[in-house]
């Protein structure tokens, strides 16, 4: 190696070291870099909060729908109209908000019992999934104890680090609304 080449290499190394020191000391882009590091987790957290609020709002809407539609059974309107399960589901869908896909994801289960102690409200599960084949429609007669349940499979999109909000296989949250009452004399 020639002496000129060695001087050139030392000068190049010195120039690189000076450039690195200037780059490290330069503060103009620090805010942009810090925002870039924090922006993605912050935006994901905002979306997770919004989705959680939407799930709770949907649950409350489903509770209002079961109270309104349960009254149709309790007062005998469903029995006097000889409604089938699909006709009752149509009435339920008329009372729900636009949040729900009634045709595909809303399920109705109406059962009657002889007394409150024998009434059950356990959702029909099969391997972590809602078993829709076990849905019944038995509105009962005057004085019957009736349990009306609405099930809705709400999709969860923002799960962050785990599936804390979903309670079913496939990343869905099963929303359940239940009303238990004694049918009025009609």
Image (cartoon, rainbow, N blue to C red):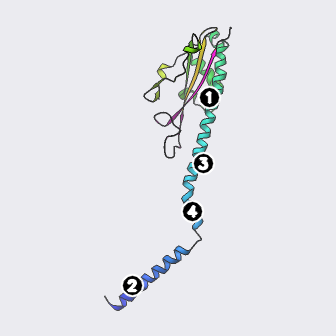
Q: Mark 4 highlights which residue?
A: 34
CB under 8 Å between discs 1 and 3: no
Q: Quadrant location of residue 111?
A: top right
First-in-chain label (1 vs 4): 4
- Whole-Å distance between the Cαs marked 4 and 2? 35 Å
Mark 2 sits on what residue? 9
Q: Secondary structure at mark 2?
A: helix
In the picture, the disc for residue 46 is 3
Range covered by the magenta-colored residues: 154-181
Residue depicted at x 49% and y 37%: 171
Residue at left 53%, top 28%? 104
Q: Nearer the viewer, residue 90 or 30?
A: 30
Residue identified by numbered label 1: 62
**Could you tell me which quadrant the C terminus lies in?**
top right
Left or right: 54 as drawn, with respect to 6: right
Spatial CA distance of label 1 from label 4 is 42 Å
Q: Position of residue 16 (x, y in %)?
A: 45, 79
Instruction: Identify whether 36 is placed above or below 123.
Output: below
């Amino acid at each position: 190696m020639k002496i000129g080449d060695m001087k050139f290499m030392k000068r190049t190394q010195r120039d690189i070291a000076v450039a690195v020191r200037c780059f490290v000391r330069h503060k103009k882009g620090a805010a942009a870099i810090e925002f870039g590091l924090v922006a993605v987790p912050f935006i994901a957290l905002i979306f997770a909060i919004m989705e959680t609020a939407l799930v709770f709002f949907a649950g409350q809407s489903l509770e209002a729908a079961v109270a309104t539609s349960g009254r149709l059974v309790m007062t005998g309107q469903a029995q006097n109209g000889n409604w089938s399960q699909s006709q009752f589901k149509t009435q339920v869908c008329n009372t729900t908000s636009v949040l729900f896909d009634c045709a595909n994801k809303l399920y109705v289960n109406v059962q009657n019992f002889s007394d409150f102690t024998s009434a059950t409200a356990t959702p029909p599960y099969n391997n972590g999934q809602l078993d829709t084949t076990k849905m019944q429609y038995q509105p009962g007669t005057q004085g019957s104890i009736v349990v009306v349940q609405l099930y809705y499979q709400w999709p969860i999109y923002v799960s962050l680090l785990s599936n804390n909000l979903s309670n079913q296989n496939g990343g869905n949250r099963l929303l359940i609304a239940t009303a238990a009452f004694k049918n009025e004399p009609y």
